[in-house]
Amino acid sequence: MASDKIVTLTDGNFDSDVIGNQQLTIVDFWAEWCGPCRALAPTIDALATDYAGKVKVGKLNVDENPEVTMRYMVRGIPTVLLFKGGKVVDQQVGAVDKSVLKQMVDRHM
Amino acid sequence: MSDTTRSVTIIGSGPAGLTAALYTARANLKPLLIEGLEAGGQLMMTTAVENFPGFQDGIMGPDLMAAMRGQAERFGAEVHRGNVTAVALNEHPFRITSEDGEIHTHALIIATGASARLLGLPRERQLLGHGVSTCATCDGFFFRGRPIAVVGGGDSALEEATFLTRFASHVTVIHRRDELRASMIMQDKARANPRISFEWNAEVVDIIGDGAVSAVRLRNLQTGAHKELPVDGLFVAIGHTPNTALFTGQLEMDENGYLVTSDGPKTSIPGVFACGDVQDHVYRQAITAAGSGCMAAIDAERYLAHRLGHR
């Protein structure tokens, strides 16, 4: 069901795909067992479509990727971090409205 | 969403909203249900629900909600992902605005529920997702072997504390009084748990941490003494606020913002019905929410039959 425009991020590819990438990147930290993450998933899919070619959208499973999760001190999900030039420039926690995430992204475009 | 005028629109997708959708769908009213941000409602944040009749061995909250949704859809309810941003209840049919546009509806059922309340401390929002949480089942996982605290003294606080001992090395329950509001069964469970201790007559005055929570500062309400409690996580379970911002100035509310209903689910505007936690600060159970959703559906059906000569 996840959009094919979404990159699956892992402890293995995070540095090359996000840190070493100058493009604006949305990273959704999630897990299977998290209800609000499921609620947010269609919004993340929609962002990947809306910003196709302009903003990279990735999802990172916190169960399978503890290293990146710990590095950004993520202790709650869903958490969406926005990266620019390899650094965190903004964040949203919880299942938020699509317009909230769009405003966050647009501020940094 | 089609732009024709709907017979009935439901806002909210917890037990109240989905039950209203089930009943109005079975009455052939082709309801539109707009899920809202917290799709599935508060039960999406729980684990086993042990008190919903019919499930002898309990059922997981998210599974119960998926089943309720599937059941409503089976009878033709249209469930729409999205969030309502404005309503106009001073015109007929009522006008509902969401991110995806505007629709009109002859009857409206409000089931927007209530959301967890925060303490209102300056650093709290900043540290949400980095140690501050309102959802133990979502975030307990991150505190394996770490000390944490839960603020609150009601059933949900003790339920969270008990659940969190699966992960945390120790859970401190911080409560403003020296006795708990929680039911005896929850109290007994928590008091018997060796990994739970209590800070009585205490309030959190500050959350300490750079990037992530490292401690909370407590003030004793009897002595005024301050102390620091080193924790990696702070779970806030101090009650709920009804989601009624959309209706301010349009519907009658009580001093806490709950919608006022009379004669069952009727609000101060004919044709607008409210069910579930948005109008109930007393019972707040999945089963009472579902029951009131059923009442709202039946009254909406009667209203439409009377007003439009439906059916």
Image (spheres, rainbow, N blue to C red):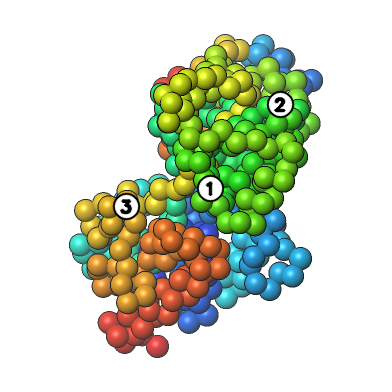
Horizontal and vertical percent position of residue B152: 52, 41
- The residue tagged 3 is B257
Q: Determine whether B154 is above or below A64 in the image.
A: below
Residue lying at 72% horizontally and 46% vertically, measured from the top left? B192
- The residue tagged 2 is B146
The local crowd at label 1, few if under 14, some if 14 to 19, many if 20 or more residues have their Cα within 10 Å, is some
Q: Determine whether B61 is above or below A89 in the image.
A: below
Sequence-wise, the earlier of marks 1 and 2 is: 2
What secondary structure is found at the residue carrying circle 3?
loop
* Number of the label disc, if any, that sits on residue A91: none
Q: Is residue B101 left or right of residue A42?
A: left
Horizontal and vertical percent position of residue B222: 43, 31
What secondary structure is found at the residue carrying circle 2?
loop
Horizontal and vertical percent position of residue B215: 57, 20
Dot 1 and dot 2 within a common chain = yes
Circle nearer the viewer, 2 or 3 = 2
**For this rendering, which residue is in front, A90 or B276?**
B276
